[in-house]
Amino acid sequence: MLEKMDDFFTARVDGYDEHMRQFVEEDSEFYAFTASLLPGAENAEVLDLGCGTGLELEAYFALNPAAKVTGIDLTEAMLNALKEKFSGKNITTVCGSYFDVPFGEEVYDAAVSVESLHHFSEEEKLPLYTKLCKALKPGGRFVLTDFYCDTDDQEGFFRRELIRIRKEENLPDGVFYHYDTPMTTEHEKKILLSAGFSNVEELGAWGTTHTIVAEK
C-alpha cells in the first residue's frame, strides 16, 4: 500500500538523517558538492525545495553561516527537526507543497533541492520550474541533486507502475503518495530549459544521484 507523502516522512523522521547517511550512495560527497555550488556571499537568499531535516544545509551553513534560507517541506515533523538542528541560523520554514506555495519574483540568489523531486512527472515539474525561474534574481541558479534512472525505458516503467498501483488502490487524484519515479538526466534538463533557464548542465554524479545546475 502506498503511503501519503507527508505520512511517509512523518513516520520516518526519527533516524532519517542516519538512514540517509548509511544507505544513500556517497551522500556526504554530494551534499558537500551541492553546498559548494550555492552562493557564498553574506546574507545570500536561498530557497530550499523539499528541505526535510536540512542535510544539505549542514554543509551549506558550514560554508556560509550568514546565509538566509527559506525551506519548504510538506512534512511538519521534518521542519520541526530542521528548526531544532539550526536554531541559531536565519531560516524561514514553510509547511506546504512547493507546487502551491508562491515564491515571488526575483527574490532568491539561488535555489536548491536534494533527493525530493524524483517523485514527480514532467507535467508537475514544468510549472514548478517556471515559477522557480521567475523567483530567482538575474544570474541566479538552481542546484538540483536527485535520484535519476539510466534509460527512457526505466523512466517509463516507473511511471507506468505508479499509475497501475494508484488505480489498483483506488487512490484519489491530487494527493501525493510516496513512490519513486526518477527521470533520466536528459529529460530533466529539457524540462528546465523549457521552464526558462538559459543554461543547464550536469556537474556531478554518484551512482544514481546526479547534480544538475540550471542558470537563469
Image (cartoon, rainbow, N blue to C red):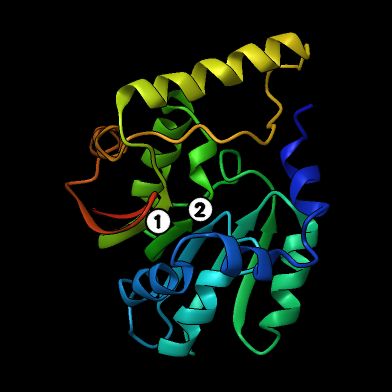
- Where 186 falls versus 110 (above or below)? above
Do callouts 2 and 1 mark residues in contact (Cβ within 8 Å)? yes
- Earlier along the polypeptide chain: callout 2 or callout 1? 2
**Residue ID at (80%, 53%):** 10
**Residue ID at (78%, 14%):** 169
**Residue ID at (71%, 85%):** 87
- Quarter of the rendering containing residue 53: bottom right
- Where 194 falls versus 213 (above or below)? above
Label 2, on which residue?
115
Alpha-carbon distance for marks 2 and 1?
Answer: 6 Å
What amino acid is at disc 1? Thr
Please state if 79 lies on the left or on the right of 155 as rendered: right
Label 1, on which residue?
145
Point out residue 166 in the picture as x, y percentages from the top left corner. 69, 16
How many residues crowd around disc 1 within 10 Å: few (fewer than 14), some, or many (20 or more)?
A: many
Point out residue 99 in the picture as x, y percentages from the top left corner. 56, 39
**Residue ID at (46%, 20%):** 157
The N terminus lies in which quarter of the figure? Answer: top right
